[in-house]
Amino acid sequence: DIQMTQSPSSLSASVGDRVTITCRASQSITNCLSWYQQQPGKAPKVLISAASRLQSGVPSRFSGSGSGTDFTLTISSLQPEDFATYYCQHSLGSPWTFGQGTKVEIK
Amino acid sequence: EVQLVESGGGLVQPGGSLRLSCAASGFTFTTYWMSWVRQAPGKGLEWVANIKEDGSDTYYGDSVKGRFTISRDNAKNSLYLQMNSLRAEDTAVYYCAALGHSSVWFLDYWGQGTLVTVSS
C-alpha cells in the first residue's frame, strides 16, 4: 500500500501569512493527488485535484504543485476561514490513502 | 443542488451488523462512481470503499475487506454500506461521497456523515 506522509502535523500562522503544507508518497503516484480542507464538525471539501487543478469555487489563494512523490499545498495569504485541517489523498489504485492531516491554527 | 444524506448510524455491539444508506439528489447518480470514507473520533480520514456507476466493480480498504459490502440501487438513487462483524475500531463518522474525475479520481461531493459507535 502507498503511504502518504504530511508535514507538519500542525502549524500556527497569522492572517495574511503564506502557508505551505507538504505531502510525500511512499512511491511515485504521478499526479494522482488531491487536497481537502475540513472545518471542525463538517465534511471535507476538495480544494485541488490532479496535484494542481483548482476546483471550481475554490479561492485562487490556494495552489498545489508537485508530481511523483513530493507535493505541496500553498495558501498565499491566509484568511480567517482557512483555519482548518488539510489532508492529501492519493488515487493511484486501491487502496486509496490519506495523509494524517495538517491542522492550521491561529497564532 | 447536490445533496448526499447518510442515515443508519447508531450504537451496535461488537460482532454486530449495521447497514448505512446514502440518498443522493441534485446530480445524475447513475453516472458517478461512489465512495464511503470514515473518520474515527479525533482522527484523520480513512477511505473505506468505492463502487462503479453500475455496481459491477467494487474496491475496499484492507481494514474492512471481507466484512463490509458496498452496493447501490440506481433506481432509488441510493448507496449502501453493509457492515458485519463490527469491531470497536470501526467506530467513526461515515461519509458517502461522489467521485469526480479530472484526469485523476477525487472525492467531489460529500454528505454530512453518520456516526457509528461499536461498543458493549
Image: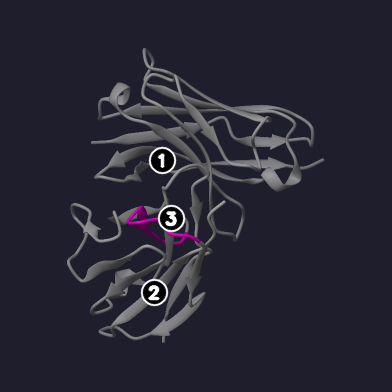
Question: Is A73 rendered above or below residue B24?
Answer: below
Neighbourhood count class around disc 1 (C-alpha, 10 Å): few under 14, some 14–19, many 20 upward: many
Q: Which residue lies furthest to the right in this view?
A: B120
Q: Type of residue at label 1?
A: Gly
Measuring from the top left, give residue A62's x and y in whole percent: 24, 68
Neighbourhood count class around disc 2 (C-alpha, 10 Å): few under 14, some 14–19, many 20 upward: many
* Residue at horizontal 50 percent and vertical 42 percent from the top: A94
In the figure, is residue A69 to the left or right of A1? left
Measuring from the top left, give residue A93's x and y in whole percent: 45, 43
Question: Is A34 rendered above or below residue A13?
Answer: above
Question: Which residue is tagged 2?
Answer: A21
Q: Type of residue at label 2?
A: Ile
User: Of helix, strand and loop, which one carries label 1?
Assistant: loop
User: Of helix, strand and loop, which one carries label 2?
Assistant: strand
Q: Which residue lies furthest to the top in this view?
A: B75
Pick the residue in front: B74 or A5: A5
Q: Nearer the viewer, mark 3 or mark 1?
A: 3
For the residues marked 2 and 3, what is the alpha-carbon distance in whole angstroms?
A: 13 Å
Question: Which residue is tagged 3?
Answer: A89
Q: Which mark is residue B111?
A: 1
In magenta segment, residue B69: no
Look at the image and give the residue range highlighted in magenta.
A27-40
Same chain shared by disc 3 and disc 1: no
Q: Type of residue at label 3?
A: Gln
* Residue at horizontal 35 percent and vertical 78 percent from the top: A20
Measuring from the top left, give residue A68's x and y in whole percent: 37, 62
Going from N to C along the chain, the mark reached first, 2 or 3, is 2
* Residue at horizontal 38 percent and vertical 19 percent from the top: B54
In the figure, is residue B5 to the left or right of B10? left
